[in-house]
Image: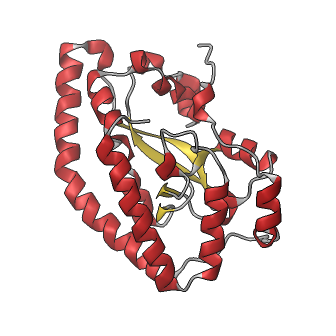
Amino acid sequence: MNITEPAEAFPYKPPTSDILKKYPHVFELKEPLPPRFFKVMFDKLIAILLLLVAAPILLLLKFAFLIEGLLIPENSGPMFFYYNGVSAGKTIPKYKIRLIKTKYIEPEGAKRHDWIAYSAEWTPDSRTHVGQFVKKFYLDELPQFWSVLKGDMSIVGPRPLSVLHYERDRAQGNVTRFLLRGGLLGLGHINKGTSEMGNPVYEYEYVDQYLRRSSFGLLCLDLWIIWKGILVIAKGGGH
C-alpha cells in the first residue's frame, strides 16, 4: 500500500529568531525536566476520575463498533490501537480509538506501530460512521488517560508526536518535546483549528513557566489551559 503523508499531520514550525532570543535558557537544557509534585498528583487523580467516567462511554462505543461491523463488514475491526510516540524524549505507546476502516491501515507498518500506517485518518472518506462521531468530539483521545495514569503523559504538555514527527521536529531545532512529558492539552494545542496551530512559541512559553513557577503556580496554569481546552472540545469539529 502506497501511503502519502497528509500535509496537515505536521503543522509544527521551527523556532523563530525571536524564540531563540527570548528563551535561550530553554535551549541550554540537556535533560528532561523533573516532574512537579502538584502537577503529578493532579494528573493521577484526574486520570482515575476520567477513566471511571469514560468507562460507560467506551462501553457504548464498543457496542456501536460491533453493531456497525455487523451491518457493514468492511468497517469491523478492533476498537483500540496504538502507535509509537515520544514523550520527554522517551518512546511510549500512544493509545487511540480506531477511526478508519481496516482496509486503510497499512498492515506492515501497523505491526511496527508506526504512525504512518494509520495516517489515512486525516481523510474523512476513510472513516467509519462511529469514527466520524468519535473524531468530531475528540473521543479518540480517551485511552490516553491510561497513559497519564501510568506516568507516560501529563494532562497538560506539548502533544506527543509520533517517532517520525518527533525526529523531524528535533531536526528543525525544537526541544520542548524532549524536555517535557507529552500532554493531552498544551498552550499550543488550544489553538487547534486556527492559524496559530503549530506555532512553537506557545510550547516554549509553557517550558519557561514550568521553570519559573512554583509547583502550585504551575498547577494553576494547567487548570487555565484545561478550561480553554474544554471550550475547544465543546465546539466540536475534531480538527
- Looking at the picture, does residue 98 appear above or below residue 180? above
- Looking at the picture, does residue 7 appear above or below residue 210? above
Give residue 133's position: percent from left, percent from top.
28, 31
How did the renderer colour the structure?
A: secondary structure
Give residue 187's position: percent from left, percent from top.
53, 58
Give residue 24's position: percent from left, percent from top.
81, 68
- Image position of 47 (left or right of 40): left
Q: Residue at x 67, y 52 (%)?
A: 200
Q: Residue at x 51, y 84 (%)?
A: 215
Give residue 29's position: percent from left, percent from top.
78, 71
Q: Quadrant of the N terminus?
A: top right
- Image position of 10 (left or right of 72): right
- Is residue 89 something one can see in this rendering? no
Task: Give the image quarter of residue 196.
Answer: top right
- Image position of 152 (left or right of 58): right
Q: Residue at x 57, y 56 (%)?
A: 158
Q: Quadrant of the C terminus?
A: top left
Q: Nearer the viewer, residue 13 or 65?
A: 13
Q: Residue at x 60, y 46 (%)?
A: 161
Q: Nearer the viewer, residue 56 or 185?
A: 185
- Is residue 233 something one can see in this rendering? yes
Total labels drawn: 0
